[in-house]
Image (cartoon, rainbow, N blue to C red):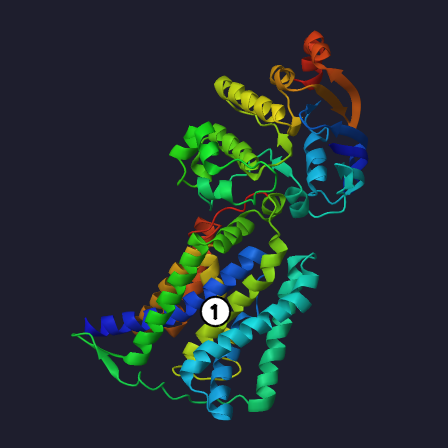
Amino acid sequence: MLRVEGLHAWYGEATVLRDVALTVAPGEVVTLVGRNGAGKSTLLRCVMGLHPGRRGTISLDDRDIGSLPAHRRARLGLGWVPDDRGAYASLSVTENLTLPPAVGPDPWSLDRVYETFPVLHERRNSAATQLSGGEQQMLALARVLRMGARVLLCDEPTEGLAPLLVARVADILRQVRDQGTAVLLVEQNLRFATGVADRHHLLAEGRVVETLRNDEVREREGELLTYLGI
Amino acid sequence: MSSFLQHTFDGLVSGAFLALLALGLSVIFGMLRVVNFAHGACYMLGAVGTYLLLTEFGIPFWWALLIVPLVLGAFGMAVERTLVHPLARLDPLYNFLLTFGLTLVLQDLVKLRYGTTSSPYATPAGLTGTVDFGLFDFPAYRVFVLAFAAVACAGVWWLLGHTRVGMVVRAATERPELTRALGIDVGRWVTPVFGFGIALAAVAGVLAAPMRAVNPLMGADLVIVVFAVVVIGGLGSIFGSVAAGFGIGLVQAWGESYLDQWPIVAQTSVFVIMAVVLLWRPAGLFGREEAPA
């Protein structure tokens, strides 16, 4: 169980997050919805230990991880899928996948990754940045699955993907969720979000202003889309 | 034709020194984002160390080629831990100033003890003659230097490209923050990589002892050229550093031979090339634009 309590974050003088609290249980997908600049990515970076300007409590299975460096958090089972997809130009696709250590009880084997993502197998010797945007997104997701991460922190995994690939990402997220992985998802695509998630936190000016269930999001879709400016 | 071959060979040999030094500088910069101004002083210590091992302890060249890089590599690791690391969080300028200061200290320490006159070092046993290439005879020692440096550069290239350590170094060089977030303790690799870069400078110094004047200032001018080489090749690019090292060695040798009426042109050619490369490709010939963290 990932738990965030009383989280404040800032860049210099500018406050980005104010008193944010949320939990993600194993087998649960929780989304963060909000306009650009609402603090969604910063929240993931705080959980991962990459944002220095923060205070508050972050715990994993009741263990306080708030003061651990990023690599220790990763080794406890946090898997970050960054918003820019995090492909290394100087590493091949296979190296991108095998760079992180296996950390969880059930890391995917390379064979399983390649079975699930045949396109990565085809391009396994290419530099990762030569992949298309969609393929890079698959790579970023496959990488944290290969680590065996127990908590996925996915920053807009469907951004810029063709509808077919969006459906594919949804399938995979549902599959890992059903196997007990917790997923914290930054997402603007509400259709996608309601298809995979259980709860949705609406972030505005650094606060969680509302928490919505799937049926509530569907009911208020028009209003929310207008609010998000999409 | 034969003089052209001669100049080309000489250029490759001096390029070998530039390549070894640029390689170490580049690996260090990639991993630490520290421009190690003391690299030239470490090269000098390599040569002086080789000289001292022989004169003080009677230890010959071949042993020096093993001992000096190990000792200076360890020295480099100690410097990284005690001096470079505490400044790593501050502006990169602080570490640049630190290594600049370190250069002056090291040069003056050697000067204080041994003066500024150059000391001769005999060509190592077994490499005193010449090697016959048909058209030409080249001094055996220089052929050895070229071959040794080429093998060392290829070895480092292989190490970076085909080992787990090399993969981690490449990843951490390209995107340090992401690499930490993927569970890799980047900080643990910083000290050995710094030591390794210094050891490469020491190797260049040992190789220089029998063919260049050994004195406290021998690295001072060279390091400026090495900086230019690294910038031309692309900061942090291993292949770029090696290629630019040999390339600039050639340009300098040809310039000195064919433009000997205009020594100023030959001497400044490196920096002119650097300026042109920077205007044309700001990241260097083989460098990448800096990715986001």
Quarter of the N terminus of chain B within the rendering? bottom left
Vertical side of A158 occupied by B291: above or below: below
Q: Is residue A206 left or right of residue B184?
A: right
Compared with residue B139, is residue B78 higher up or lower down, i.e. above or below? above
Q: Chain of mark 1?
A: B
Question: Which quadrant of the figure has residue A172?
Answer: top right
Q: Is residue A85 left or right of residue B144?
A: right
* Residue closer to the observer: A85 or B62: B62
Q: Which residue is mark 1?
A: B200
Quadrant of the rendering where the C terminus of chain B is positioned: top right
Query: What residue is at 52 percent from the left and 66 percent from the top?
Result: B196
- Residue type for callout 1: Leu
The percent coordinates of residue B56 (x first, y second) are 51, 92
Asked whether the viewer can see residue A206, the reply is no
Q: Does any portion of residue A185 appear in the rendered image?
A: yes
Quarter of the image where one finds residue A115: top left
Badge count: 1
Which is nearer the eye, B87 or B199? B199
Identify the secondary structure beneath mark 1.
Answer: helix
In this view, the residue in front, B251 or B113, is B113
Q: Where is residue A117 drawn, in percent x and y?
A: 46, 29
Residue A96, compared with residue B257, is above or below; it is above
Left or right of B71 in this view: B17 = left
Q: Badge 1, how many Cα within 10 Å: few under 14, some, many 20+? A: many
Q: Residue at x 46, y 64 (%)?
A: B22
Q: Residue at x 25, y 74 (%)?
A: B6
Q: Where is residue B149? Give x, y as percent.
A: 38, 69
Classify A166 as above or below A102: above
Location of residue A48 in the rendering, given as x and y in whole percent from the top left corner: 68, 40
Q: Within the image, what quadrant is residue A7 found in?
A: top right
Residue at the (40%, 35%) spot, across then down: A123
